[in-house]
Image (cartoon, rainbow, N blue to C red):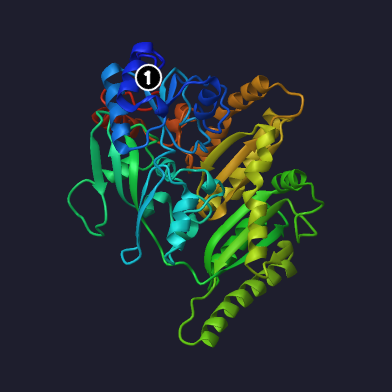
Amino acid sequence: MPGFRRADDPDFLAALRERIGEAQLRSQPEDLAYYGADRCKGGWPVAPGVIALPRTVEQVQAIVELCAARGVAIVPSGGRTGLTGAATATGKELVLSLERLDAILEVDATSRLLRCQAGATVEAVQQAAAGVGLEYPVDFAAKGSAHIAGSVATNAGGVKVIRHGLTRDWVSGLEVVLASGERLSLGGELIKNNTGYDLRQLFIGSEGTLGVIVELTLKLAQPAPGHEVALCSLRDDEALLELFSRLRAAPLTLSAFECFDRGCIDRVIAHRGVAQAGPLAELGPMQALIEIERGAGEGSDDERDDAEDTSRDRLLELLADAQDEGLVLDAALAAGEAQARELWAWREDISESLHPHTPHKADVAVPVREVVRFVGRWRAAVAEALPEIPALCFGHVGDGNLHLNLLCPEGMALEDFLARCHSFDPTLYGLVRDHRGSVSAEHGIGLLKRDYLGHTRSAREVEIMRAIKQVFDPTGVLNPGKLFPPRS
């Protein structure tokens, strides 16, 4: 990488071994390939110089301090489930994997806080919270492999933003290692701390460009008494917003409202090798997955049961009315927790079913009221510019976050496919700008979207962000080339 020393330089490697030991380093081709990239296939080279797997925060500090002194660039790495190339090494950088720092350090049920290391998975955090009767409510399909620090570094959203907000809303404190190797404590257990700038927030969504997150203090929540889950097939895209509006207006607590078009569910059916989408006998152009919280109820067991029954009955009535009016073609309401998980799986299995088709993905957000109009314009634009390429859409209607997928047709070379997709990107992100949207809703900018940052952020905002980067990382060794477009 221009301006930086290669991490595979023999003198640097010798100094690194002396600092942290041979057992914490990997340089075999299979390791370089495995740790060197996230799930984004962007057409750029995957070329890390060495992989470092520290076991302690002190080793992280030693690595960062040495890299800063020797001018070696660092790519922080978590579970590498990201989709923008933010965790991809392209120029012989040192990949700093935090997978061995995976301890749950403390769960405080009284304060509803959990402290953990960076490499703990989101699912491990959820399980630890559940062990004391609480929950970490940020939830998404990749939770079993996504690291909690990576989810904070990208401000992950997931399927329940409509109810619980983004990752940003659940971070109480961070321990970060700066580009100098210093350890900085930001926030912590305090609920109130009104003492100037909240630097903690700068690191949430920073994609490893300001520092390396090594420890986190997370807020926990009281779980809902239970959930009702329904899977529906809809008449058309317009029915999606109409049904969402009715649910919002009803005396129900909506925790998730997901959508996926016919192409997505057809791919899941094919991936599973089954005949139909579970209990749905009729599929529409668009499907919706709905989750509501059961009423908490107070007093006796009978009163709590009545509250739960009321939530279920209200949802049933709403869906029946929508079906009578032709908005809903078919619907299934889960009879219990096992069936609820089965219905959710139709949404959560989409990404895995698309993966064999090497999708070119776009994670965007538009105002909720613009969702249907935007999707229609996007489909029309793809049909005109890329008629031979399948275009599929799924996402989180409740927060306006859409995942747009272009699939590589059978027989088309990957290079040709990516070239076609990248040629279409200006049209896509132009539509996002036209609809006052964001070029990234929950996966960040990375390499994939840095040239389009200006579609969502003003030139002055980008200038201020660059200045913040300069303060925290004056030599630019932390994840260089990510987030910001190259200077012209």
Which of the 4 quarters of the picture holds residue 203?
top left
The N terminus is located in which quarter? top left
Total residue callouts: 1
Quarter location, residue 302: bottom right
Closer to the camera, 237 or 86?
86
Residue type for callout 1: Arg
**Which of 135/397 is in front?**
135
Element class at badge 1 = loop
> In x, y percent, where is residue 126?
47, 56
- Point out residue 458 in the picture as x, y percentages from the top left corner: 37, 34
Can see residue 364? yes
- Where residue 129 sits in the image (x, y, percent)? 43, 60
Q: Residue at x 43, y 55 (%)?
A: 165
Establish if 296 lies above or below 392: below
Q: Is residue 243 above or below residue 350?
A: below
**Residue 485 seen in this snapshot:** no
**Quadrant placement of the C terminus:** top left
Could you tell whether 4 is left or right of 241 in the image? left
In the displayed structure, 259 sits above or below 378; it is: below
Return the x and y of residue 151 as percentages of the image width and height.
Answer: 44, 44
Where is mark 1, residue-wise? Answer: 487
